[in-house]
Amino acid sequence: MFRSLLFAPGDSEKKMLKASNVGADCVILDLEDSVVESRKPIAREMVTEFLKQGGNPEVSYFVRINPLDSGKFLQDLAAVVPAGPAGIVFPKSNGVQEALVIGNYIEVLEVEHGLPTDSVRLLPLVSETPTAIFTMGEYKDGPARMMGLTWGAEDLGAAVGASANLQSNKDWTSPYQMTRALCLFAAHAAKVQAIDTVMADFRDLDRLKVVCNEGRRDGFTGKICIHPAQVEVINEAYSPSSEELDHARAVIKAFAENPEAGTLQIEGKMIDKPHLVLAERVMAFAAELSNK
């Protein structure tokens, strides 16, 4: 389970190293948008070499490849998969069939290079084209290697000619609120992580805290970020607090002591089975964090 997923340009060893040592759960080595066209072959080589060197053992490394229509994704996969990344970020996915295609290519490379099947996970970006908005529910039938779904607003906005995607109060405008919600429910339908998109204004950490708290409240389990300064805020927001852990323990204990009960009272409030499911999820995530 990843709380923070930090992008690092694949053509900068300095930035890849820095991103590896700021506490992010996952570093996404980028071959797509943050790399200009003329440097993409260089970035591919640098990312491959970086992965071979191992990086920080406490960090999971994903690679964002170029999209299917770029003519570059096969070169990207052929170069980086043999180096054993933890996962691939697949941009501009139009639907689960495209994710399955990418998964099949990864499987061929795993077999060819002696990697365990499904060892390279897959994180599709599921909202970057207008077509993609209508296919999110299909990911419930996605490949076994799929570990999450995430969304993005910038490419989608460009595709539809939007002049802005944020309101004056920095909330998403209504089309992007809808897109965010669809990604959230699609991820949970697929039983994978729901990962919120980036907040581009990396200097406004107070706003970032609000955004993260709202994301976790809504059911997101992590967030992508674009600057090292955002990592600490995201990690804190997406980690269970001591109060949450105490409450989860109390809920689990109450149902363990009353196995036949459908509803119970704790601290003057009624709880039922969905509260138990949430409590168990909180405790499982806390256990996972303690093992990092």
Image (cartoon, rainbow, N blue to C red):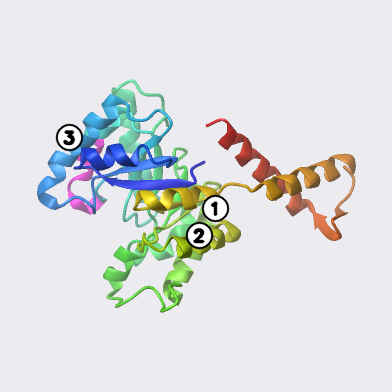
User: Label 1's element?
Assistant: helix
Report which quarter residue 105 is drawn in: top left
Which badge, 3 or 1, is on the more N-terminal residue? 3
For marks 2 and 3, the one nearer the N-term is: 3
Q: Which residue is mark 2?
A: 209
Q: Amino acid at mark 2?
A: Lys
* SS type, badge 3: helix
Q: Magenta residues, as a range?
A: 68-78
Tell me the crowding category of disc 3: few under 14, some 14 to 19, or many 20 or more residues within 10 angstroms, Cα based: some
Calculate the distance from the C-alpha at mark 2 to the C-alpha at mark 3. Answer: 36 Å
Q: Is residue 220 left or right of residue 102?
A: right
Q: Residues within 10 Å of mark 1 (few under 14, many from 20)?
A: many
Inspect the image, locate mark 1, and give the three-letter code of the amino acid beneath it.
Ala
Of all residues, the one furthest to the left in this rendering is: 38
Q: CA distance from mark 3 to mark 1?
A: 35 Å
Q: Earlier in the sequence, mark 1 or mark 2?
A: 2
Q: Position of residue 129 (x, y in %)?
A: 32, 63
- Main SS class of the magenta portion in the image: helix
Q: Which residue is mark 3?
A: 45
Verify CB contact (< 8 Å) between mark 3 and mark 1: no
Label 1 sits on residue: 237
